[in-house]
Amino acid sequence: MKRYLMGIFAGMVFFSSCNCDKNKPDAYGTFEATEVIVSSLATGQIMKFDVEEGEILDSGIIVGYIDTVDLELKRKQSFETRAATASRKDDVVAQIAVQEQNRENVLVDKRRVERLLQDGAATQKQMDDINASLNLIEKQVASLKIQFGGISSQVASITQQIAQIDQSINRSKIVNPIRGTVLTKYAEKDEVATYGKPLYKIADLSVITLRAYVGGSQLPYIKLGSVIDVAYDKDENANTHVSGVVSWISPSAEFTPKTIQTKEERVNLVYAVKVRVVNDGSIKIGMPGEIKLINY
């Protein structure tokens, strides 16, 4: 009888051990999200900054702006300079028109002198003087056209400067790049921001990623795009299970991170995988998670 009871007990232990191994997760990891640090693209005082930690922001909205008074003054001055420079073009055009009219008048005189020269009523010097006048007019017209081109280049350069100022003014706006939740706020209204200074950190938590580590023997059971079971702590005794999609598999092996399980497992070579999970808000960045390969 004693041997019989011991046999039953051993069988129960064996069954329990097998059942535990069967229910044991195949890989462990932590949840992470793609975090974006929004930095200042201008230098100046922060005049408006409507950002709070935990707030959900839509992409493309303006959450604040940096002082642009100096830029606006430069823009106004550039418009006035361009207008004054452009007005010089009208003067040059008028001068060119006068010289072209003079050329027409001299050409009329030239034709008259040519007829008189044929009749012997004019001298060669008169013809030479007319040709010299025509050459002088041509040079003056060419010089005026060069001036006109130079003024046009100046106007184009000032226009480019205005475009650069407009871009700087536009960069003074703090535009939220993605839809997500504000994780950390680094600046406040009325502070002075410099170019590249971090203002806040944001991440899309609607879809979160579990980075887990699997052994080489498990790789055949993981494929890109495959759906697997993901679990995370619900309470002390139970887990919440959701479906996840494998979005990335590391092409090379690495040593298991120190945060993963026992010392023996930490010295093994493993492969990192990423599993994307739709988040209802209960999964937080840094939470531990685990995956179960159903067919493994």
Image: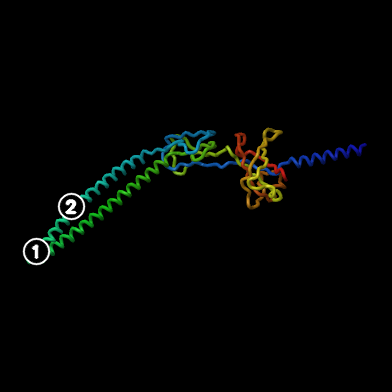
* Circles 1 and 2: CB atoms closer than 8 Å: no
Residue position marked by numbered label 1 in the rendering: 116
Q: Position of residue 245 (x, y in %)?
A: 63, 43
Q: Is residue 220 left or right of residue 140?
A: right
Residue count near mark 1 (Cα–Cα under 10 Å), binned few <14, some 14–19, many ≥20: few
Mark 1 vs mark 2: in front: 1
Residue position marked by numbered label 2 in the rendering: 98
Q: Secondary structure at mark 1?
A: helix
Q: Secondary structure at mark 2?
A: helix
Residue count near mark 2 (Cα–Cα under 10 Å), binned few <14, some 14–19, many ≥20: some
- Residue 291, by quadrant, is top right
Q: Position of residue 176 (x, y in %)?
A: 48, 39
The one of 120 and 188 positioned closer to us in this rendering: 120
Q: Looking at the image, which residue sits at the far left?
A: 121
Quadrant (top left, top right, bottom left, bottom right) of the C terminus:
top right
Give the residue drawn at x 53%, y 42%: 36
The numbered mark at residue 163 is: none
Quadrant (top left, top right, bottom left, bottom right) of the N terminus:
top right
- Which kind of residue does numbered mark 2 sit on? Val
Determine the CA span between mark 1 and mark 2.
27 Å
* Residue 267 visible in this rendered orientation of the protein: no
- Which kind of residue does numbered mark 1 sit on? Leu
- Residue 274, by quadrant, is top right
